[in-house]
Image (spheres, rainbow, N blue to C red):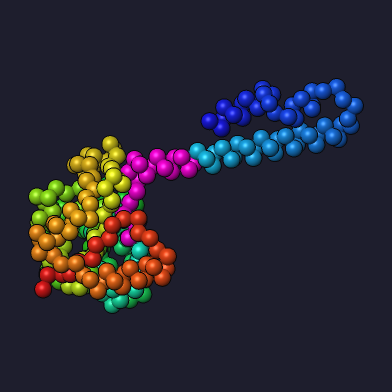
Amino acid sequence: MSRRQVSSMRRGGNFPFVGALNSKSKSSPLLSVGLVVLGAFLLIGYAFRGSGVSGRAREAVSNVEGDFSCTLEVQRAIPILNKAYGDSMRKILHVGPDTCSVVSRLLKEEETEAWGVEPYDIEDADRNCKNLVRKGIVRVADIKFPLPYRAKSFALVIVSDALDYLSPKYLNKTLPELARVSADGLVIFTGYPGQQRAKVAELSKFGRPAKMRSPSWWARFFVQTSLEENENAIKKFEQAASKNSYKPGCQVFHLNSYH
């Protein structure tokens, strides 16, 4: 759009300085040069203004198409999670796509040990991620099957962008398994209904488009799998979020581990 606007200006349509430059006035050469420079600055400013609008439009379209990531939201929420869970944040398992980025971020926290499970292929992973896999810090595993960890191996398990791609049939197995390997709790980051969809290019990776479920749907499912919400963690998380003006872009559920 901005390109068409710029080109129309170059043809002289409604641009005030074009007429001034073409008029047979007796103005000094210095004034003419000044008008040309000013006109050029106005053209550049108008072009950048147009590109800014289109940039915001692209961002809006990007979110609709499914670029929104709850895995990125986990990284934003780490300071809030620290205040809500305290010492439980010292030994964490993150499960979800791009877990390497979350694990790398968590390892920068003081006295924090972190591991990750990547549910999908990592052929395109960067050197840092492949290094984490080589060291055994991050594992590639199909979460529809039992996790390769003993019960209560981690204080806290955080999962994002993974459960949305599982049908209830597999959720019945995966969710209890995530709770099994946690000692102090399970935190789930999931999208709101209508918020996120898998792109066409990702369908082969995930196998199915994401299905965003409502809070009431999850509440019923937690009851079916005998998982209780962690009221104490919910309260602390909400207090820390309010104090820090943090508004989650995803649904965040806090669950107790199995006793």
Q: Is residue 222 above or below residue 212?
A: below
Residue under the image location 9 percent in, 50 percent down: 169
Q: Is residue 188 magenta?
A: no
- Identify the residue shown where x is 34% and y is 73%: 83
**65 relative to 232 in the view: left or right:** right
Q: Position of residue 158 (x, y in %)?
A: 25, 63
Percent from the top left, x then y, of residue 22? 79, 23
Residue 216 image position (x, y, % from top left): 19, 55
Please provide the residue range marked out in magenta: 55-74
Q: Is residue 205 above or below residue 189?
A: above
Occupied quadrant, residue 229? bottom left
Question: Which image quarter holds the C terminus?
Answer: bottom left
Magenta region, mostly helix, strand or loop?
helix
Q: Position of residue 210 (x, y in %)?
A: 23, 45
Q: Residue furthest front?
A: 216
Q: Residue at image x 29%, y 71%?
A: 235
Judge left or right: residue 156 versus residue 54.
left
- Considering only vertical position in the picture, is 150 above or below 5? below
* Residue in the image at 23% along x and 39% along y: 203
